[in-house]
Amino acid sequence: MYVDFNELPKNSKVWIYQSTRKFNDDEMLKINELLISFVQTWKDHGKNVTGSFQIKYNQFIIIALDNNERNVPGCVIDASIRVLREIENLYQVDLLNKFNTTYRENGSINVVKLIEFQKLAKESKINLDTIVFNGMVSTIQEFESLWEVPVTKSWHQRYFN
C-alpha cells in the first residue's frame, strides 16, 4: 500500500539508490508513475506492505518500507530491485552500483567511483567539510539526520586518515 513518505514511522526501513546522473522532467514523471505503481502492489509473501518513496534532487531514489520492527524478507527487497533495474534500462543509468560515491561541490552533485573519491581525498581536492551522501543509512530517522552530511559525520572520513 502506497502512503505519503512523511506518514511512515521514523523507524521505517529505507534504501537509497543514486543515479549516475540527474533525471529530466519527463523521466521524473515516468519514474514517479513506475514507483507509485510498484509500491501500491508491493507484497511480502502475498500480503500487502506499506511503503513509499521520494526522489531527491532528481537523482536519488529513496524507497521506504514500514517494517513494523521485523526483519525485511528477501522477496520484498528483490521486488524493489526489479523496478530499479527497469528504471536503469529505460534511462541508461546506474542505480545499483554501491561503489559509486556522491558528494556536493560548488552546489552541484558529483558521482564518482569510490576509488576516484579516495584519490580526490588524498590529493586534497575534497576535504572533511565536503558534503557527502551517506547511502549507508537504514531508517527514515537516519535518512533525515545522517544522509547529507559533512565527511566528518560519515563513513567517508576513513579516506582522510
Image (cartoon, rainbow, N blue to C red):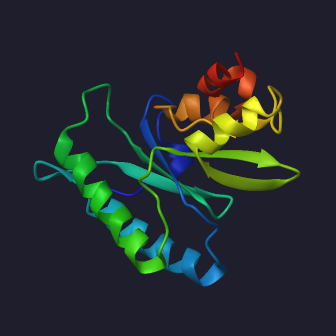
Q: Name the spot of residue 108 as percent of width and height, x first.
A: 80, 56
Quadrant of the image containing the N terminus = bottom left
Which residue lies most toward the left here? 45
Q: Name the spot of residue 64 as percent of width and height, x first.
A: 43, 45
Closest to the observer, 125 or 92: 125
- Count of numbered circles on the image: 0
Quarter of image, res 134:
top right
Which residue lies most toward the right here? 106
Residue depicted at 74% across the width and 30% down the height: 122
Residue depicted at 44% across the width and 51% down the height: 97
Closest to the observer, 143 or 84: 84
Quarter of image, res 141:
top right
- Residue 89 against residue 82 in the figure, above or below: below
47 relative to 5 in the view: left or right: left
Q: Name the spot of residue 113 as percent of width and height, x first.
A: 57, 48
Which residue lies most toward the bottom here? 26
Closest to the observer, 152 or 54: 152
Residue depicted at 47% across the width and 62% down the height: 94
20 relative to 148 in the view: left or right: left
63 relative to 100 in the view: left or right: left
Closest to the observer, 4 or 82: 82
Quadrant of the image containing the C terminus = top right
Residue depicted at 45% across the width and 28% down the height: 11
- Residue 101 against residue 94 in the figure, above or below: above
